Amino acid sequence: MFRKVQWKGRKRISSFKGALALLPLCLFLVACQGQGPGEAGSGEVAQTGEASSGEVAQTGEESYPILSLEELSQYAHLIVAANFKESGGAFKVLPHGGDVPAVFTDRVFEITKVYKGDRQRGDEVILRTQGGDLEGEEDGPLLDRNSEELNFEDGGEVLLFLARPTTDPYKTREDYYQLVGGPNGAYTFSSGILKNLADPSMTLEEGELADIDPTVDPRGLERARMEEALKAGAMSQEEYDDYFERLEQYGERQ
């Protein structure tokens, strides 16, 4: 059975199976972090991503693997329970290389519990998502594409699986995080059950959070899998070098 992730306020495309090649899941998540408006977010994914379940949630032009708790935990730099505090509003980012700008929204959360990472209870953390309402702009692809309409503003404690941006050409040098695997990375707490914020039918038991290994370094894991792919011939030396070069390339917030 394939699973859909329903996004509030948008009609989304159903998921598909079997379109993924043999490179690591980390590259899939990287590919999901940001593409320019009009670019196919799944284009790089089809060549470089792998989800252990073989299931993919496709939202708009963007595709996301349906991740297990173990996968979410491995690729998260920070896992926290937190309360929404405020939204910083929408803004444009010009990607590295000066292509078409895209719209993002920053939201501030106050941490109530840390499951993984170097933050503490009471710290604030910024979550950046694609899309948003930008004053003075007409509706169109710039605003509609990949608008991650997760409703944090309703209040209540949420569980966030957060990652630092890596090869996203729209990443900036500010201190912020993105959700691991897009809609996979946000859950609400409900009487011992965690419900995915985008698709409440996707659930975790709160007791499962005790299985999170906070010692797993996603950067080290990512590098190890890249090296394995290089040795196996699944990627060229040029692709390998280009990946690490893009880690140091940044866009510009406008």
Image (spheres, helix red, strand yellow):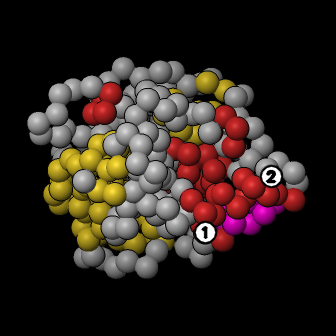
Element under label 2?
Answer: loop
* Separation of residues labelled 2 and 1 (CA atoms): 20 Å
Please state if 100 lies on the left or on the right of 253 as rendered: right
Q: Position of residue 236 (x, y in %)?
A: 80, 52
State the image quarter where residue 123 is shown: bottom left
Label 2 or label 1, whichever comes before in sequence order:
1
**20, 47: nearer the viewer:** 47
Please state if 122 lies on the left or on the right of 115 as rendered: left
Position of residue 148 relative to residue 138, above or below, is below
What amino acid does circle 2 point to?
Ser
Q: Which residue is mark 2?
A: 236
Q: Which contiguous range is marked in magenta?
A: 221-228
Q: Position of residue 157 (x, y in %)?
A: 27, 57
Element under label 1?
Answer: helix
Q: Residue furthest front?
A: 98
Image quadrant where one finds the N terminus: top right
State the image quarter where residue 11 is shown: top left
Task: Name the disc covering residue 77, or none.
Answer: none
What amino acid does circle 1 point to?
Arg
What residue is at 40 percent from the left and 72 percent from the top?
A: 114
Please state if 146 lies on the left or on the right of 57 as rendered: left
Task: Name the disc covering residue 219, or none.
Answer: 1
What residue is at 74 percent from the left and 66 percent from the top?
A: 224
Kindly tell me whether residue 172 is visible in this rendering. Answer: yes
Badge 1: how crowded within 10 Å, few (<14), some, or many (20+)?
some
Q: Position of residue 73 (x, y in %)?
A: 55, 60
**72, 88: nearer the viewer:** 88
Position of residue 168 relative to residue 103, above or below, is below
What residue is at 25 percent from the left and 76 percent from the top?
A: 122
Badge 2: how crowded within 10 Å, few (<14), some, or many (20+)?
few
